[in-house]
Amino acid sequence: MADTTPPLPDFSSGFSIRDLPDGGKVLGRVDQEEVLLVRTGDAVFAVGPHCTHYHGPLVDGLVVGDTIRCPWHHACFSLATGEAVRAPALDPIPCWRVERIGDLAYVRKRTAEAPGPARPSSSSVPTSIVIVGGGAAGLAAADVLRRERYDGPITMLTADDSPPVDRPNLSKDFLAGTAQEDWIPLRSPDFYSERRIELVLNARVTSLDANQESIHLENGQRHSFGALLIATGAEPIHLDIPGATSAQTCYLRTFSDSRAIVAKAISAKSVVVVGASFIGLEVAASLRARGIGIHVVAPESQPLERVMGPEVGEFIRRLHEEHGVVFHLGSTVRRVDGRVVTLTDGTTLDADFLVLGVGVRPAIDLAEQAGLEVDRGIAVNEYLETSASGVYAAGDVARWPDPHTGDRIRVEHWVVAERQGQTAARNMLGYRERFDAVPFFWSQHYDVTINYVGHAEQWDRIEIEGSLDARDCAVTYMRGERKLAAATMSRDLSSLRAEALMEGQINTAGR
Ligand SMILES: Cc1cc2nc3c(=O)[nH]c(=O)nc-3n(C[C@H](O)[C@H](O)[C@H](O)COP(=O)(O)OP(=O)(O)OC[C@H]3O[C@@H](n4cnc5c(N)ncnc54)[C@H](O)[C@@H]3O)c2cc1C
């Protein structure tokens, strides 16, 4: 069949900006390259049309001030320089020079990448930086330190046996068999060598002496630091199930964990997932994609109800049931005998193996041992500083004062971890930047993605706009007249707008 898509406008021959409203975007081309033309106020920018995180279409994103935000996972780029100003994107988008003649905007040559900020003055920067943790927060911090032209030594120590990986993918496409192994590392080996980031794998840090500015590793090595970032994340909670062998029970946090489940899944017919958490349910969806029979066992009456409320919980249960998942709610595993899994209600299930997704606990041992202030996580201030001078914490491990809720909160969201890593890194260089990002996470179940902005531990009502069944809705969690959080399906712009609105709430409150 002939392609009936109209050709993209050629921006090199001029585009009438009268056709472009404030905040409007239009996709076109220059030579053979696709270019996005964006208007904000009187200014017109030409940038690359794809997010550098997952290639999301920026034409469907939101323009906020002089930035554009990706509809998929809320990355944010400067329209003027292309810089990725907020994770999850770490790399810039290209920019083109725009010439205005009357009402016409002509897109000219691609501009060189912005040189980045000036190198911080030596009096305000630490002599060396050690990052404990090679996850979302740790990598984003190291990345920003070099982008900010920090010149001193950076050492990243990780207990993992692989370089930083796209952890969210481990329960999604990689586990389902639709993402290749080489997509999973966040950066190539060259990235670390070119940026002089000394990445040490299998390097578990066992003690910290904040006064002596040194840490010790399990293998006896010692490192001193000028500033330290603790980004140790969280660890899966282990369950002691009578009769179950360690070979039968899988947890999912690391690349190795995901590979181990994939290896077992190749010959498996039936798997029991213990816990109806986000990770448990994503594992269920991914293993269903491999044709494996899945039983989910969990004590609650609806999956995800505590975080998302009963309506979304019921929708998620039905969605998984439509894909063949069998739920055993209000129940837990009593014991395992070979392949037979017995539940507390007496039901017996046949299983090749079990995946346990019953939550995580923040990895605070190091902080506790060092006498840092802890409060169900490492307590940090708005600059992500711990109670010890020169020691910062970011990511799943950190509990911070959230200006949006007024509470001290700790979350387990990829984007929050990366953004905290970025803020902590800048603060090590003397920026004194408050961490005030609105929390955001996403979760994927089959072809349904849920985006969630804000933070609602308790609400007094839930408002649903649109239809859960049609998978097209915005679910708002309210306390009084205050919008605490919003979960959306197929409404990416609404999610971006909710985020921008929540950011505005704190700006107008005159922090
Ligand atoms: C399978 C899976 C899927 C997920 N999916 C999503 C999703 O879809 N959306 C979302 O928003 N979030 C998701 N998350 C959550 C997200 O991945 C986390 O919030 C994020 O990884 C937290 O980043 P972090 O840097 O704090 O910790 P991590 O990424 O866990 O990194 C912690 C690092 O610290 C290291 N470490 C720990 N202790 C020590 C020590 N003593 N010495 C040295 N190193 C140490 C670890 O080895 C690791 O390298 C998912 C998580 C998992 C496990």
Image (cartoon, rainbow, N blue to C red):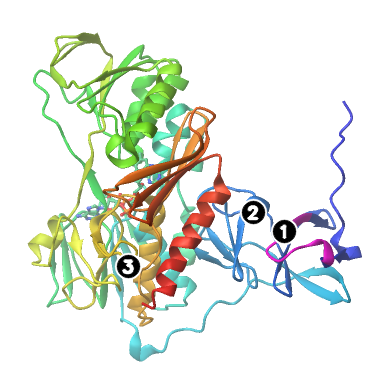
Q: Earlier in the sequence, mark 2 or mark 3?
A: 2
| Residue designated by label 1 | 25
- In the image, what residue type sits under mark 2? Leu
- In the image, what residue type sits under mark 3? Pro
* Labels 2 & 1 near each other (Cβ < 8 A): yes
Quarter of the image for the C terminus: give it. Answer: bottom left
Numbered-mark total: 3
| Residue designated by label 3 | 403
On the question of residue 184 being in view, the answer is no
In the rendered structure, which segment of residues is drawn in magenta?
18-27
Quarter of the image for the N terminus: give it. Answer: top right
Q: Earlier in the sequence, mark 2 or mark 1?
A: 1
Secondary structure under the numbered disc 1 in the rendered image: strand
- In the image, what residue type sits under mark 1? Lys
Measure the C-alpha gap from mark 1 to mark 3: 32 Å
On the question of residue 420 being in view, the answer is yes
Measure the C-alpha gap from mark 2 to mark 3: 28 Å
Front of the two marks 1 and 3: 3
